[in-house]
Image (cartoon, rainbow, N blue to C red):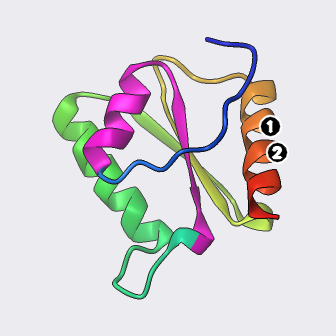
Amino acid sequence: MPDEIGSPHRVHTAQDVVGTLLRGNWAIFAHEWADPDGIDPEHWQDVVEAAAEAAGVDVEFVVIPRRSLTVVFNRAAPPSFEQVRASIEVIEAHRR
């Protein structure tokens, strides 16, 4: 995995998230991305979990309420604490 974290980019489907996880990366759902049509953090987690299960990917979700973020990763290729922290810093900078 690269040492540097790139700019955040959005994926649009649960299958895109699963593809990201299969490539050894992780995804972060910023809770403000929730919309009035029901894509809230809990719904997002349910949809991603179902897609991951269908693809045979064992996923882990970590909710960070203080930052209003949910991190998901493939348990077979977990990111380091430093990588997740760096990703959160990128998201926080992007929010400003």
Residue at left offset 24%, top offset 39%: 53
Q: Are marks 1 and 2 in contact (CB under 8 Å)?
A: yes
Q: Say if the magenta span includes residue 95.
A: no
Q: Say if the magenta span includes residue 24.
A: yes
Taking 6 as reference, is 42 above or below it? below
Where residue 1 sits, quadrant-wise, is top right
SS at mark 1 in the image: helix
Question: Which residue position is annotated with label 2?
Answer: 89
SS at mark 2 in the image: helix
Q: Could you tell whether 19 is left or right of 54 in the image? A: right
Residue at left offset 42%, top offset 29%: 21
Q: Which residues are magenta?
A: 14-32
> For residue 85, which numbered disc appears in the image?
1
Residue at left offset 72%, top offset 34%: 84
Where residue 31 sits, quadrant-wise, is bottom right
Taking 60 as reference, is 44 above or below it? below
